[in-house]
Image (cartoon, grey):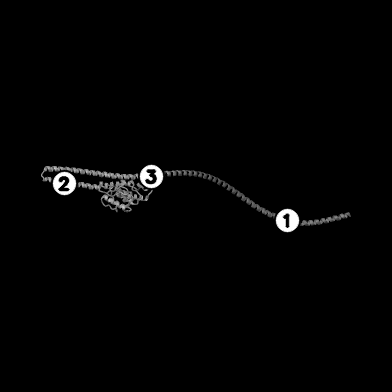
Amino acid sequence: MEPIGAAYNLTAAQFAGQVNQRGGNVAVRRAQVDYVLASFEEAKKYMSKDGIEEVHKYLRTGEWVQDQTNAGSHPACRRFVGSGGYKKTLYYPQFFVIQAIYTLNSRQIGDAVERMYEELSGHWGKFIPSDKPFYPRLADPDQERLLIMGDYRWRDFQVGRQASNNTIHVTIPEAKGHAAALNDNDNTNNKQKVLDGYLRAAAQLSAEINTESQLKGRDREVQLLQDQLRDSQQRNADLQRQVQEQTKLRRHAEHQTKMSQNRLKERQEQLQDAQDQLHETQQELQDMHHRYRESRMLLSKYEEKAKQVHHHISQSQSFSNRALEAASKTQSLLALGQQQSNKALNLLSDPIEEFNAAAESSGLAVHDGQRTNKRAREN
């Protein structure tokens, strides 16, 4: 059995919008997508191209991506079995989703899943176990199509057709019985007329049966179209609801985008102000740096002058120290000189005193002599 090609490929990225929508459990929705896509890849190995195409058409809508962790709460299960106000669809792609999410992976076999498998088994006319995947493929593509689409009246039509065929087989032998009775009356012409009448009646009945079969076939087609129409209307309602939700999300996103743009504009204005302030600060910094360089130059000059002053002070200090030393020496010399002078004076004073004393003595003697001489002259 050849697997279906790349024409019906599905990727998780195609359902990113449903998975990442606001609210609910994103992890649950992402896991559902992974489970369903894995089952879809497996189904390609077994199902017919038409069956895969129908499943692909349903999966592509993304309406099955939900938050429900319980199979009975999932819209696909409720639609399939006809619960929660939904009309029973028996639409195989809806079963396919529930099978992939809840029975093949989580092994969640509750009352809702059991009912779903009971409905499925009754619809397909055979027991379908829940412990292995059900990927149908029939030899009759028309019957497979009707069963996949949920045409559960197909078997009733089959029974009605078999009943009509039985009526044909019963009618013809009855005509033969009358013909045998006519043979007993040995009336060949009458037998021929009666036989022709029965044959015409049989032909008319056969035509009516064919017409009835055609009508039933048309009724079946009409019913199928009505079921498809109801399913399409239901899908359309779901899509409209999704469109409304997406519109709300889009409006919310537009509002958020507008708010973000306003905040971005404010941030840009703040950034521009900050850049202007930065430019001013940089300009002030450059001015300060220029003044700093000038101050450094002045400081260098002052330091050079300070060095020169310090050198002069050092020289002056040295000169002062030398002067002090010289003064000290001079003072010492002066003191020594004073001492020598004092000694000299002392040495000189003694003879002078002696001289003075001698002089005084001589003076007195002379004076006395003069006085004596005067007296003598007077005398």
Given residues 290 and 125, the one toward you in this image is: 125
Q: Secondary structure at mark 3?
A: helix
Q: Position of residue 159 (x, y in %)?
A: 23, 48
Amino acid type of the residue tagged 1 in the rendering: Asn
Residue linked to disc 1: 342
Most extreme residue toward the left is 186
Q: Nearer the viewer, mark 1 or mark 3?
A: 3
**Can you give x and y, in whole percent of width and height, for residue 274 in the image?**
48, 44
Which tag is nearer the camera, tag 1 or tag 2? 2
> Which residue occupies the extreme right position in the image?
379
Say which label, 1 or 3, has the lower sequence index.
Answer: 3
Q: Which residue is mark 3?
A: 248
Q: Is residue 240 above or below residue 344?
A: above
Mark 3 vs mark 2, foreground winner is 2
The answer for how far apart the CA atoms under marks 1 and 3 are is 128 Å
Q: Is residue 49 left or right of residue 193?
A: right
Question: Looking at the image, which residue is at 80% across and 56% down?
Answer: 360
> 10 Å neighbourhood of mark 2: few (<14), some, or many (≥20)?
few
Instruction: State the image coordinates of residue 53 (x, y, percent, origin top left).
Output: 29, 46
How far is mark 1 from mark 2, CA to CA?
A: 195 Å
- Asked whether the residues under the numbered discs 3 and 2 touch, taking CB atoms below 8 Å apart as contact, a structural biologist would say no
Amino acid type at image mark 3: Lys
In the image, taking residue 359 as reference, residue 42 lies left or right, namely: left
Q: Secondary structure under badge 1?
A: helix
Q: Which is nearer the N-term, disc 3 or disc 2?
A: 2
- For label 2, the residue is 174
Question: In the rendered structure, which amino acid carries the disc numbered 2?
Answer: Glu
Compare marks 1 and 2 and give the one earlier in the sequence. 2
Residue displayed at 77% across by 56% down: 353
Q: Residues within 10 Å of mark 1 (few under 14, many from 20)?
A: few
Residue 288: x and y in percent read 53, 45
Is residue 353 visible from the viewing direction of this image?
A: yes
